[in-house]
Amino acid sequence: MEYVFLWLHSFAAATLLPIGSEPTLLVLLEKEYNPLLLLLFATGGNTAGAVINWVIGRYLLRFKGASWFPINNESLIKAQRQFSRRGVWVLLLAWLPVLGDPLTLVAGILRVNLVAFVILVGFGKCMRYMVFVFPYWL
């Protein structure tokens, strides 16, 4: 049950909600849960949450003309240029606080290939969690 809670917490942390999943991960590591399973559940949940951001971004452009649309055309063009300049490799940084969640949303808006998105974002998020999990494998 704790693994599912970690997955859900990690999922929510990857959305635009201002929460972090690392404290939950650390508590479970201290309680001596399996580090590999914790790594897999945290990475899986956090990557799935990022995919939700991608999906929201992917379909957000349908409402581009609406008055409530959160991104003006100038900002969208700027984001497209930044992505073009840096490429999809910037998604390896999707684990960063503050920057990472909007980055996954913009990737959806720019229609980044979903398979490439999952691989790059998942790898970056796994490496972040590995920083916390690795000492418990020693």
Image (cartoon, rainbow, N blue to C red):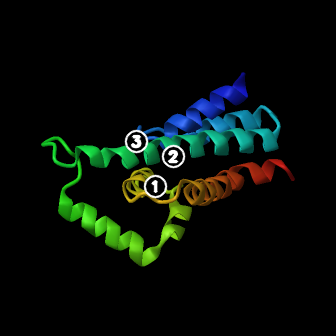
Q: CA distance from mark 1 to mark 3?
A: 9 Å
Q: Earlier in the sequence, mark 1 or mark 3?
A: 3
Residue sitting at x 83%, y 37%: 34
Q: Earlier in the sequence, mark 2 or mark 1?
A: 2
Task: Please identify, in this view, whether the residue under mark 2 or under mark 3 is nearer the observer.
Answer: 2
Label 1 close to label 3 by CB (< 8 Å): no
Mark number, residue 100: 1
Residue sitting at x 64%, y 33%: 7
Mark 1 Cα-neighbour bin, 10 Å: few <14, some 14–19, many ≥20: many
Give the SS element for disc 3: loop
Q: Position of residue 84 (x, y in %)?
A: 40, 74
Mark 3 Cα-neighbour bin, 10 Å: few <14, some 14–19, many ≥20: some
- Reading the image, the residue beneath label 3 is 16
In the image, what residue type sits under mark 3?
Leu
Q: Position of residue 111 (x, y in %)?
A: 42, 57
In the image, what residue type sits under mark 2?
Ala
In the image, what residue type sits under mark 1?
Gly
Q: Position of residue 69 (x, y in %)?
A: 20, 45
Residue sitting at x 57%, y 32%: 9
Q: Residue 68: name its quadrant.
A: top left
